[in-house]
Image (tube, rainbow, N blue to C red):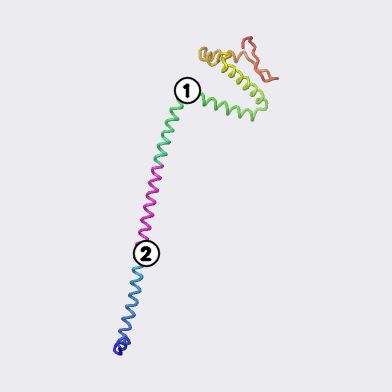
Amino acid sequence: MQDILNVLKQPFTLGLLLGLLFFAGALYHLMRAKLDLARFRRHLSDKLELEAKNLQDLRQEKDRLSQENENLRIKTAQSSNDPNQHLERELELLARAERHMNLNAPGFAGAWETAKSQALAEIQEEERGNTLPKKIFRKFFGSSETKQIAADSTLDPSTGETQSSSPAS
C-alpha cells in the first residue's frame, strides 16, 4: 500500500490524474452539447414541419377563396343580365332615394307617405281581385299610357294627394 501512495505522490501521477479529471469534465460537456444539438435539431425540424403544414393550409385556403371569388364574380356578371336583378336594383335605388328625401326634404315625407298608402291600397285591391292589375296594361300598352296618366294627374299642394284632371282614373 505504501508503494501505491508513493506512486500517487509523484508529480507525474498527480498531473496524469488532474489531466484525466479535466478530460472527463470536457468529455461530459461534449456529450451534453451533442445531446443539446440533437434536441435543437429535432425542435427545428418539428417547427419547420409545422410551418410547412400551416403554409400549405394557407395556400389551400387562398386557392379555395380565389375559386369562390371567381365563382361569385361569374354569378354577379350573370345576374346583372337577369331582368329581375334590374328590377331589384331599381327598387333598392328608390328605397335609398326615399330615405334620402325623408331626411333632407321637409315637405316630402307627408306627401310621400300619402302616395305610398294609396299605392298600397291599389295593390291590395288588385290582390283581392276587385280591379285588373295595372301591370298587365303596362305590358300591353307600354309606357305611353303611364306617361299620359302622369300628365293628367296633378299633385294638390295643400293635401299632398294626387288629383286627376280626367274623369276616369
Range drawn in magenta: 38-61
In which quadrant is the N terminus drawn?
bottom left
**Between 119 and 2, which is closer to the camera in this rendering?**
2
Residue under numbered circle 1: 83
Residues marked 2 and 1 touching at CB (< 8 Å): no
Vertical relation: 13 (above or below) 114: below
Residue at the spot 55% in from the left edge and 27% down from the top edge: 93
Instruction: From the image, state whether disc 2 or disc 1 is nearer to you.
Output: 2
Residue under numbered circle 2: 36
In which quadrant is the C terminus drawn?
top right
Residue furthest to the right in view is 158
Image-based side of 102 in relation to 5, left or right = right
**Between 105 and 48, which is closer to the camera in this rendering?**
48
Residue furthest to the bottom in view is 2
Q: Quadrant of residue 145?
A: top right
**Mark 2: amino acid:** Asp
The local crowd at label 1, few if under 14, some if 14 to 19, many if 20 or more residues have their Cα within 10 Å, is few
Image-based side of 115 in relation to 10, left or right = right
Rendered location of residue 37, percent (x, y): 35, 63
Q: Earlier in the sequence, mark 2 or mark 1?
A: 2
The local crowd at label 2, few if under 14, some if 14 to 19, many if 20 or more residues have their Cα within 10 Å, is few
**Between 5 and 84, which is closer to the camera in this rendering?**
5
Residue furthest to the top in view is 167
